[in-house]
Image (spheres, helix red, strand yellow):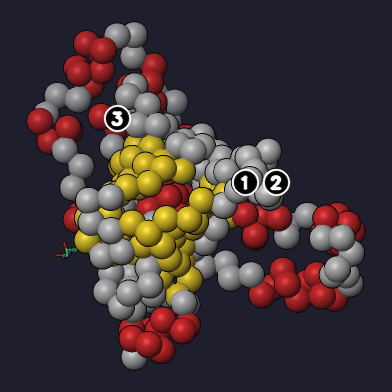
Amino acid sequence: MLSKFAFSSVLALALVQARPTEAAPHAMLGRSTAEPSLTTQLRLADTAADRYALLPTDEDFVYDFSKNPALPLADGESFPALVGTGLSFSYSQLPGCGMTFVHLHPRATEIFAIASGRIHSEMVPEGGIVDSKGNQRVIKAEIGPGMMTIYPAGSFHTQVNPDCEAANFTAAFNSEDTGMSLVADQTFAFSDDIIARTFGKSIAGEDIDKVRHAIPNDLLIMVEECLAKCGKQKRQV
Ligand SMILES: *[C@@H]1O[C@H](CO)[C@@H](O)[C@H](O)[C@H]1NC(C)=O
């Protein structure tokens, strides 16, 4: 299990799935139809002027990431002032030796910038994007303070913090509702015979289940070799 700290500092989008159920869209069903959420009211507003009227205080236009450590993502739901902008924004940190699970955002391109620390980034773009030898292109980048990279919508990507100290980052998305998919975990949700054929019958039978259960379902994993180098225990990060 991740410590509270590691959990709260994981890449914001990974946390979208960990939102409390009362924040999930289906919670609307339990609510009185007489009072839709502020986000819904803003989405239904006829004009921008009507939206401003729904956000009467100056505080409505401020999102304090330090007060929302468990959800370092401002989007149309957590920060209603974003409704109508088509944007979300994250301000967080990846702990030392941390790695975000290979994931993708189905509805947003992400630009990811480092404020302090260092990140090794890998991104696999859409099918058909090949290198000079005809192999699937893999875009690798080392990014440090003052640098950023881009993950086009739907591209598979991951970030590894190779250092002992946390890396602080910001990320912007061109959707108010970016979504997130965990590539390995979701691929192994298919039935066994689909998995067997997908992997060229290189795994079958009980091995499929073994792999399925070995895939960490934590949103952030720690790189063991790095932890050893830094003299850290998993639970200390
Ligand atoms: C990284 O972010 C944390 C939490 O916001 C902050 O305390 C720390 O000073 C930042 N580190 C650097 C080097 O900017």
Q: Within the displayed image, which quadrant is ligand 1 positioned in?
A: bottom left
Which amino acid does the dot numbered 3 rest on? Leu
- Name the residue beneath numbered marker 2: 134
Q: Which mark is residue 82?
A: 3
The answer to whether mark 1 and mark 2 are in CB contact below 8 A is yes
Cα separation between marks 1 and 3: 38 Å
Which type of secondary structure does the marked residue at label 3 adopt? helix
Q: Residues within 10 Å of mark 2 (few under 14, many from 20)?
A: few
Q: Which residue is mark 1?
A: 131
How far across and down, in percent of the image, does residue 210 sit? 75, 76
| Mark identifier at residue 72 | none
Q: Residue at x 37, y 87 (%)?
A: 229
- Where is the C terminus found, in terms of image quarters? bottom left
Q: Is the CB of the residue bearing disc 2 within 8 angstroms of ligand 1?
A: no
Q: Is residue 6 visible?
A: no
Left or right position of 169 against 14: left
